Image: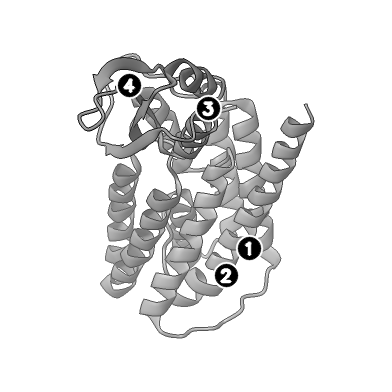
């Protein structure tokens, strides 16, 4: 119980940090360079700018950003978990509030540098949220919903949608801004893919003389099945057993630690897995 409470405190802290970083990326990098971020953030900025420039209606970006996120959260609420949705709304709420009142700190004036470093900071913000049972809302809600449904990463499709949105912005506001915005989004997407391991998999092969102890220890920490295969060591001609399992990448360290705890002398090989089919357990979002 105490561990669960500590985890929730950690998650809330990381989500607050995530929201602060995203707001800083927007006010100090995105807005000064006239860039359009990814997803709902970029769409909100585009909509706010169009209303102001063509209809003289001044509705701040933050109002659109939080309202759209709230609508999407209501739609997917029962599919992606209550705690996850609440943390995500906390993140988007912090971003909406800080972008209204946070004063920008201008450290760069070159558009290309603003796009690259802004995209990296924005990606770190998203990665922090996703690694701590939350998201930055918007398309993240939809992407994670479909990722849970099909058990594979869809971040590349998100990037494609964002490129389409930026092209529309390019038609209205110029292609230079559009190109820099695509660079910003590319950097963001790459950081997310590097940090977020929920939908990537690894195959772990363990050779051990203590198969039952190792299997029991691993299963006490994960719900993934393990296949046992009898084998014979070619050098010493000693009978051993191969344990074969596939886990999410973020679980690999726990599995390795469990195996070494049960048998410090076991041999472990870890390989990246392209795809998984069949009865694979995906831990649900809280």
Residue visible at 55% across and 32% down? Answer: 261
Expressed as whole percent of the image width and height from the top left, the position of residue 180 reads 33, 71
Expressed as whole percent of the image width and height from the top left, the position of residue 283 reads 50, 24
Q: Quadrant of residue 114?
A: bottom left
Pick whichever of labels 4 and 1 is earlier in the sequence.
1
Residue visible at 38% across and 23% down? Answer: 149
Residue 153 can be seen in this image: no
Q: Is residue 99 left or right of residue 75?
A: right
* Residue named by callout 1: 99
| Image quadrant containing the C terminus | top right
Q: Where residue 240 is drawn, which disc sits there?
A: 4
In this view, the residue in front, 43 or 243, is 243
Q: Residues within 10 Å of mark 4 (few under 14, many from 20)?
A: some
Q: Where residue 223 is drawn, which disc sits there?
A: none
Q: Residues within 10 Å of mark 1 (few under 14, many from 20)?
A: many
Q: Are marks 4 and 3 in contact (CB under 8 Å)?
A: no
Question: What is the spatial separation of the Cα atoms under label 2 and label 4, in whole angstroms?
Answer: 59 Å
- Disc 4 or disc 3, which is closer to the eye? 4
In this view, the residue in front, 193 or 258, is 258
Pick whichever of labels 2 and 3 is earlier in the sequence.
2
* Residue named by callout 2: 27
Q: Is residue 270 left or right of residue 101?
A: left
- Disc 4 or disc 1, which is closer to the eye? 4
Q: Are marks 1 and 3 in contact (CB under 8 Å)?
A: no
Pick whichever of labels 2 and 1 is earlier in the sequence.
2
* Residue named by callout 3: 262
């Amino acid at each position: 119980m105490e561990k669960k409470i500590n985890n929730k405190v950690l998650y809330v802290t990381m989500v607050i940090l995530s929201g602060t970083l995203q707001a800083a990326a927007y006010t100090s990098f995105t807005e000064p360079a006239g860039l359009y971020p990814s997803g709902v953030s970029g769409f909100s900025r585009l909509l706010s700018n169009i209303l102001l420039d063509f209809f003289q209606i001044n509705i701040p970006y933050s109002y659109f950003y939080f309202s759209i996120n709230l609508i999407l959260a209501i739609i997917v609420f029962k599919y992606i978990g209550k705690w996850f949705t609440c943390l995500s709304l906390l993140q988007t709420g912090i971003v909406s509030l800080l972008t209204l009142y946070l004063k920008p700190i201008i450290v760069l004036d070159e558009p290309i540098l603003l796009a690259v470093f802004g995209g990296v900071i924005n990606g770190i913000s998203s990665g922090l949220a996703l690694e701590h049972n939350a998201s930055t809302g918007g398309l993240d809600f939809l992407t994670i919903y479909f990722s849970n449904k099909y058990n594979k990463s869809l971040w590349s499709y998100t990037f494609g949608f964002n490129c389409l949105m930026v092209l529309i912005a390019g038609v209205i506001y110029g292609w230079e801004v559009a190109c820099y915005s695509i660079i910003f989004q590319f950097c963001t997407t790459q950081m997310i893919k590097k940090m977020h391991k929920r939908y990537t998999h690894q195959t772990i092969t363990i050779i051990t003389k203590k198969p039952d102890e190792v299997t029991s220890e691993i299963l006490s920490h994960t719900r993934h099945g393990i296949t046992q295969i009898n084998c014979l060591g070619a050098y010493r001609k000693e009978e051993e057993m191969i344990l074969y399992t596939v886990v999410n990448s973020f679980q690999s360290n726990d599995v390795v630690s469990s195996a070494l705890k049960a048998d410090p002398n076991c041999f472990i090989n870890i390989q990246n897995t392209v795809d998984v089919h069949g009865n694979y357990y995906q831990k649900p979002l809280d």
